[in-house]
Amino acid sequence: MTHQPSTQLLNFTVNGRAAAVTVDPMRRLADVLREDLGLTGTKIGCNAGDCGVCTVLLDGRQVCSCLVPAAQAAGRQVRTVEGLGESGNLSRLQQAFLDHGAAQCGICTPGMLMAAQDLLDRQERPAEQDVLDALGGVLCRCTGYRKIVEAVLAVAQSSNTPPDVGDASRNGHAVGTRMAKVDGVAKITGAERYGADDWPEDSLMLRVIRSPHHHARFRFGDLAGFAASHGLIAVLTAADVPGQNAFGVYPTGKDQPVFADGYTRFRGEALCALVGEDAAVAAIADGDLPITWEILPPLHGVEAALAPGAAQLHETSSGNVLVSGRLQSGDPMTALRDAAVVVRDRFRTAFVEHAYIEPEAGYAQRVGDRLEIFVTTQTPYMDRDEVALIMGLQPEQVRIIPSAVGGGFGGKLDLSLHPMIAIAAWKLNRPVRCIYSRPESMASTTKRHPAVIDIAVGADRNGRLKAITFEGDFNTGAYASWGPTVANRVPVHASGPYEVGAITCITRAIYTNDTPAGAFRGFGVPQSAIALETLLDDIAERLNTCPFELRYRNALDRDSITASGQRLAASVGLRACLDALRPQWDQWRAETAAYNKDAAANPTARLRRGVGVGCGWYGIGNTSLPNPSIMRVGLRQDGRIVLYNGAVDIGQGSNTIMMQICADALGVPVASIDLVAGDTDLTADAGKTSASRQTFVSGTALRLASEDLRRQMLRLANIAEPAQFRYAEGRWLLGDGQIEHELNLSGLSAINEHGDLLLGEGRFDPPTSPLDADGQGVPYATYSFSAQLALVEVDIDLGTTKVLRIAAAADVGRAINPTQVEGQLHGGVAQGLGLALMEEYIPGRTENLHDYLIPTIGDIPPIDTYIVEDPEPLGPFGAKGIGEPALVPTAPAILNAIRHATGARITQVPATPDRLRSALRQMQEAAE
């Protein structure tokens, strides 16, 4: 029976203050807190109790406020994240989160804090397992949970200070310190503004109606009449798009419509949008609209799309092949024929959902002849240009104001709701907002590309890699998105971080009727690493050699030549990573050997342990394409330095990193710098936040901008280097070693609308070269390297795998902020664990966080981190990137550990219990 809304006066206490609201008593408490009381610190990630980020305390005990009817709060005490601190000060728990780097994107942080507060209120000295149990209902996609556990235990043990925090307040001492996030306080107090947290008061609501079919033609009935009879302001369709009804990443690949025009290629594709007041929009069921369908046979998976006679999904792509990539070096067929050992197999990987905890959200409003869009995004300038094309406007007529981003990982590089709210706001001259539901987000946005990989590897008797052949088909789904990037990045990386005599790599991105696949932390490299790293253990087994030593023997080093013909002149730290891990490898292998010997002697023992190793490398930035960043630093009349930072922080901490780089390059304390971030009206184009590029590319541009401003300030003071800068009560004192000169700003006029008196600018585009037809050239200016060990325990009866410990080493060039490097390693490990063991998105079936499983706090083991610093001369203070490299080796290490424990080779991920049981049976049958 459908609930009929009515209203009732409800009285309760919120954060110690009386609250009275007249609302539907069945309204979600989360919505009452956020929209009626303005307490947006409580976040909503799923509205189903699956993610726990809406956790608040009700009479002192944690509840998911999205599942609590408002009526249940009547007469009771509610506490939200806004009520944790007192008198404007942080609570001990909040301070610990800040100190330990326990908040990355911050969207889950309020829920984590409230769950942790519940535990600390009930237990004075909780142990680690108590923390895991108490926080198990709150999901995080960024942190890997370990920093959160450290923070809670620090409060329980009355020790809030992490080691070696350094002193970022001193000139020239910011880089290398564990400086707290500059936006950290906003994240831990609930003050951070995400896409769903801000909207103009008179905003209309937009809701998208999506295809329930994977492949179909359709036509609308009387939409105008439908809108009038249902109290809507408008129903928008393809006919309402004023400019180009197509978007995409590449100028020649704009193949995805804003609204499907009579033909839909995947389940979840946008057909039209309802616009009106919240209640009118919410009252309409998807099936109410007048739509007539002709359902067509869908093409699921690359095999179906490539089959003879398969339907052509895009006229411009013959045989449903969007694009091919290729790399050829030497004669691998001859080398394979002459190799002492050759191993080969077919590997399959699945769609993987980004599962960022913040669903897509934002609003648009028309301001004269311009559009302003406040939205969650990783790439404001690309969004600006795409929206302008769709709207038929000039780019300068579109302003993108990035909200705080509640996780991205590549999934917020593509347009989502941006053009729809833009069209509605422009046409209706009213602000229009939209918030995707969790199922809508999962059904309609991009995923990690599923891959079918055929690979062969040959080695000589000494274990030297002589040849690789690699053919990979990547399911790009219904539309191109970042398919060309994946197809062209994988060939460069298919050889792994190893010297290989000869290689052929052919890749294809294939159109299907599946959910579009796009950018996801690694752009195809994690899939290729699974295949190669598994076969390296095959080679080690065939040669009766140590898999760890096999990798060390073949590792790229300084002056090595890569498969693309690039000589690595500097910053090649893979062997240093392996050296850091070697003691643990030896110890863990010895311990597991003893453990398994005892287990084998016990007929009833079901558990076996194994240790695996995996290595990875990752080219920083775009593949053989321009990749520039522009950064600016200004000096204001009041003496404040202003960093205009267009590099969007999606939780990885780039806002903080840039402040540290700016401070040391300029030679001033961090406290003298103000941050302006992201806004396309206020900052220059720093490029997209992806491909682990911001620290290296934008950081270098910022170093140049800061040095430019420093030179201008020195000229103004008529002082030469070396010089010291001192900031005191709004005045700059510049010293030449003998006397200090005050920088006289009184006679200067502002040079721009922002009030800057001086402005330094830096531009950096990493030096690369185009690849020829054989994939030869310089695709990246630098590479990051990583290696990881996994210790696992496998139940051979149930086929379940528990990861007991991970050791992760990464060559980052220079750790600008070690706490954030550790956080990226933890987060990458967590996503790699999900890729290896549990995550598999199935279109139409796993469109929520109940059926689609991501690692919880109880799934992530202790992680030992090793930061290797092999300085990159081009990078700011020697730094490179860490986002993608943190993920690449994890799944291979876990799969190789399963093999070490059981003997079973896994060729399809995730290695779910049924697949592992099947592999064990096949191994047993082969032995018999």
Image (cartoon, rainbow, N blue to C red):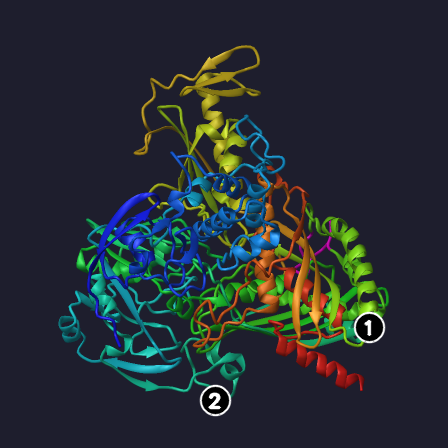
Q: At label 1, which amino acid type do we have?
A: Ala
Which of the pair 677/382 is nearer the observer?
677
Q: Within the magenta stretch, is there residue 560?
A: yes
The x and y percentages for residue 927 are 80, 83
The quadrant the C terminus occupies is bottom right
Q: Closer to the camera: disc 1 or disc 2? A: 1
Which of the pair 895/444 is nearer the observer?
895
Q: Is residue 778 above or below residue 161?
A: below
Q: In this view, does 290 lie above or below 96?
A: below
SS under mark 2: loop
Numbered circle sitting on residue 309: 2
The x and y percentages for residue 336 are 77, 73
Q: Which residue is drawn at 34% across and 17% down?
A: 746
Which of the pair 259/2 is nearer the observer?
2
The x and y percentages for residue 751 are 33, 29
The x and y percentages for residue 112 are 48, 52
Q: Residues within 10 Å of mark 1 (few under 14, many from 20)?
A: few
> Across the whole image, how many numbered discs are drawn on residues?
2
Corner quadrant of residue 827: bottom right
Which residue is identified by label 1? Answer: 600
Q: Residue at x 58, y 66 (%)?
A: 835
Q: At label 2, which amino acid type do we have?
A: Gly
Q: Is residue 874 at least partly visible in the picture?
A: no
- Give the overall secondary structure of the magenta segment: loop
SS under mark 1: helix
Corner quadrant of residue 919: bottom right
- Residue numbers of the magenta segment: 556-567
Give me the C-alpha separation between circle 1 and circle 2: 53 Å
